[in-house]
Image (cartoon, rainbow, N blue to C red):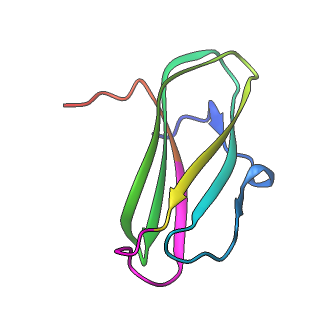
Amino acid sequence: TGDSTFTVPTSSISQSPTTANAGQTVALRFAVTSTAAASNVDVFVTILHTGSPDVQIEFRDLTFAAGEVKNFTANYLLRSTDRIGTKYWTVRVFHNLKYK
């Protein structure tokens, strides 16, 4: 949305393990920092394979105080039906997202 209220510091991003097989869980860790107080905040973690989404993990209806940092862990279970290959993940933060 172009809102600079929220940041995901690069230094906060990690995953463990970095290589996994079907049946294993990968922990995707990151932090979100808010420069202003905000409620009705949604954080979406999307796991992608060559650009198309495989899974979305959601943290909904969060509240942040000004200057607050929240740490997140999104656990992703690799299923035997998942597409094989390198996966990428993104973090998106929405404030006052309206669903239609």
Q: Looking at the image, which residue is at 61% across and 35% down?
A: 4
Q: Is residue 61 left or right of residue 29?
A: left
Viewer-proximal residue, 68 or 6?
A: 68
Q: Is residue 88 above or below residue 8?
A: below
Q: Is residue 83 left or right of residue 36?
A: left
Looking at the rendered image, the quarter that the C terminus falls into is top left
Q: Quadrant of residue 17?
A: bottom right
Q: Foreground residue, 40 or 18?
A: 18
Q: Which residues are magenta?
A: 79-91
Q: Position of residue 14 (x, y in %)?
A: 73, 58
Specify the principal SS of the magenta part.
Answer: loop
Residue 43 lies, with reference to residue 66, above or below; the image says below
Quick check: 99 above or below 82? above
* Quarter of the rendering occupied by the N terminus: top left
Image coords of residue 37 (percent x, y): 63, 15
> Would residue 38 be counted in the magenta stretch?
no
Q: Is residue 54 left or right of residue 41?
A: left
User: Is 99 left or right of 15, judged from the image as shown?
Assistant: left
Which picture quadrant has residue 82?
bottom left
